[in-house]
Amino acid sequence: MKRINSLIIILLGLSTAAFCQTKEVKEVASAIEVFKKGVISADESLLKSITADELVYGHSSGKVQDRTEFIAEIVSKLPAYLSIDMTDQTIRISANTAVVRHIYSAETMNNGTPGHVKIGNMMIWQKQHGKWKLLARQAYKLPL
């Protein structure tokens, strides 16, 4: 009987841990959607609300921006992001940090010229004051 009770307690503890992990993963996924919406709409206040002050934003070209530079470029709408799709996404949580990986595809418009971007992407999100904030992002070119 003690073995069954111990087993039940262990299983309950594991299921609670799995539920918390799922809740955190859902919160990060929601933050990513807010980020995506902010980029497409070029909404400065939305982008400020979802990014950390310490943001380091790395592009696949090697260009690195801080938060101010990243937001200024998006708000200038050059290029304008018409749509963004993130596929094969994984989210891993460790304490107040989340590591997100996905394939990032976007349709853009730059001075009347349509464009398409398809890159790999890794994002680091940190929970700050109860909210997930983008702390770092590094894009990379996909193999041909």
Image: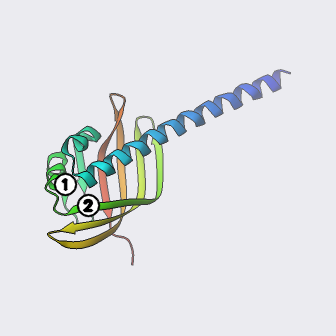
| Residue under numbered circle 1 | 74
Q: Residue at x 32, y 61 (%)?
A: 83
Amino acid marked by disc 2: Tyr
Image marks 2 and 1: residues in contact by CB distance under 8 Å: yes
Please name the residue shown 48% across and 53% down the image: 90
Is 96 drawn above or below residue 90 in the view shown? above
Q: Quadrant of residue 104?
A: bottom left
In percent of width and height, residue 1 lies at 86, 21
The type of residue carrying mark 1 is Ile
Q: Give x and y (percent) for residue 5.
A: 79, 23
Q: Is 9 drawn above or below residue 102 in the view shown?
A: above
Element carrying mark 1: helix
Gap between marks 2 and 1 measured at Cα = 8 Å
Up the image or down, 8 lies above or below 109; here it is: above
| Front tag of 2 and 1 | 2
How many marks overall?
2
Quarter of the rendering occupied by the C terminus: bottom left
Q: Provide the residue designation for mark 2.
A: 81
Residue placed furthest toward the bottom: 144
**Residue positioned most to the right:** 1
Going from N to C along the chain, the mark reached first, 2 or 1, is 1
Q: Nearer the viewer, residue 64 or 74?
A: 74
Which residue is at a point 58% across and 33% down the rendered structure image? 17
Element assignment for label 2: strand
Instruction: Answer left or right for 53 relative to 22.
Output: left
Q: How is the image coloured?
A: rainbow
